[in-house]
Amino acid sequence: MLHPAQVALVHAAGGRLVVAPNFNSDVVREAVRLDMACLPGVFTATEAFAALDAGATGLKLFPAELIPPAGVKALRAVLPRDTLVLPVGGIAPANMAAYRTAGADGFGIGSALYRPGATAAQVERSAQDFLAAWAGTIRT
């Protein structure tokens, strides 16, 4: 969601979650006002803290391909312990374990799971690869 009016539309349609590629304090505040979960996209510690101050439910680290696991670990060192951190963009089964070790709570997955023209069997195989990687990285 890029604008507060879009948040209201999602809410009116029954949505309970707003995910954005960026951080816009008005979008976060509108989601909070409507009692919706909100995961704005952030790239820097400054954006992360501003998003949390505005009431964000958690943080979508985006684009993750530009924020390596070491960056997640450094950000985790300064964020409140209970902050939900979800890298998005460039996540693949091969890099999930490193991100989890660095402190990621989960992931957003898009084109690595589905690309236009992929068959159902190809998407299923990709999904199974992600599930296997997730199972191997769950912290106990």
Image: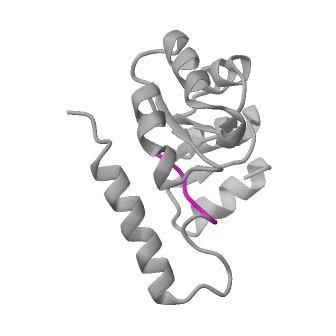
Q: Which residue is drawn at 60% across and 63% down?
A: 110
Closer-to-camera residue (61/38): 61
Please provide percent x and percent y for residue 107.
Answer: 49, 47
Give the prevailing secondary structure in the magenta stretch: loop
Q: Is 76 above or below relative to 106?
A: above
Q: What stretch is highlighted in magenta?
A: 106-111
Q: Quadrant of residue 68?
A: top right
Q: In the rendered view, does 125 fall on the left or right side of 71?
A: left
Q: Residue at x 48, y 50 (%)?
A: 94
Q: In this rendering, does residue 3 appear at all?
A: yes
* Direction top: furthest residue: 78
Q: Is 23 above or below relative to 37?
A: above
Q: In the rendered view, does 140 fall on the left or right side of 60?
A: left
Closer-to-camera residue (44/18): 44
Q: Which residue is drawn at 58% across and 70% down?
A: 13
Closer-to-camera residue (28/96): 96
Q: Is 60 above or below relative to 54?
A: below
Q: Quadrant of residue 82?
A: top left
Q: Quadrant of residue 78?
A: top right
Q: In this rendering, does residue 62 appear at all?
A: no
Q: Which residue is drawn at 60% across and 85% down?
A: 118
Please provide percent x and percent y for residue 38.
Answer: 57, 43
Q: Is 140 above or below relative to 13?
A: above
Please provide percent x and percent y for residue 112.
Answer: 59, 64
**Magenta stretch encompasses residue 5:** no
Q: Which corner quadrant holds the C terminus?
A: top left
* Direction left: furthest residue: 140
Q: In the rendered view, does 98 fall on the left or right side of 87?
A: left
Q: In the rendered view, does 46 fall on the left or right side of 137?
A: right
